[in-house]
Amino acid sequence: MSSTATLAYEITAAPTVPVANLAAAVAAVALSFTAIETVTGCTLASDTTTTLGQVVTRTIVFDINTAQFIAQFPAGTDQACPFRDLYTHELAHFLNTKVAPQPVVIA
């Protein structure tokens, strides 16, 4: 049985932008988790921002081991579907740059 959904968004710093500044900006974007939690029954487990070279990654993990989520998205169904591209446009809008969403990992 799956217990988490991991969403990761990568943003590459432009050569003129210090990666530390981009990381701070990415971490500062206030995302709302209320709607997805209400609709699916998942709960936020963690929200972290990391850097590797010029790439900043914001990783959001939801606990999907709840009765509501399991009833709506039982094992064998596409449990990643409610999370795909969930925050891509919001991050891109606030950061005014391209955001590369990574595949949702259900584990």
Image (spheres, rainbow, N blue to C red):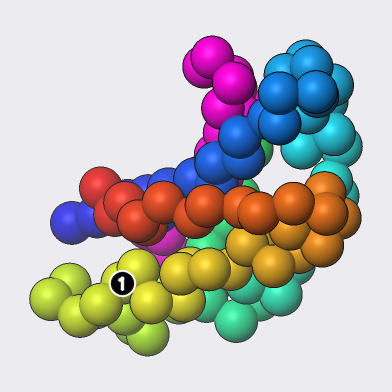
Whether 64 is among the magenta residues is: yes
Residue 7 in view in this figure: no
- Front residue of 59 and 76: 59
Looking at the image, is 99 positioned above or below residue 59? below
Residue hosting label 1: 79
Q: Position of residue 80 (x, y in %)?
A: 35, 68
- Front residue of 20 and 44: 20
Q: Position of residue 74 (x, y in %)?
A: 24, 78
Looking at the image, is 40 positioned above or below residue 51? below
Q: SS at mark 1? A: loop
Whether 60 is among the magenta residues is: yes
Magenta stretch: dominant secondary structure: strand
Instruction: Give the number of callouts.
Output: 1
Q: Which residues are magenta?
A: 49-66
Q: Position of residue 29 (x, y in %)?
A: 84, 46
Q: Position of residue 90 (x, y in %)?
A: 76, 64
Q: Is residue 13 left or right of residue 71?
A: right
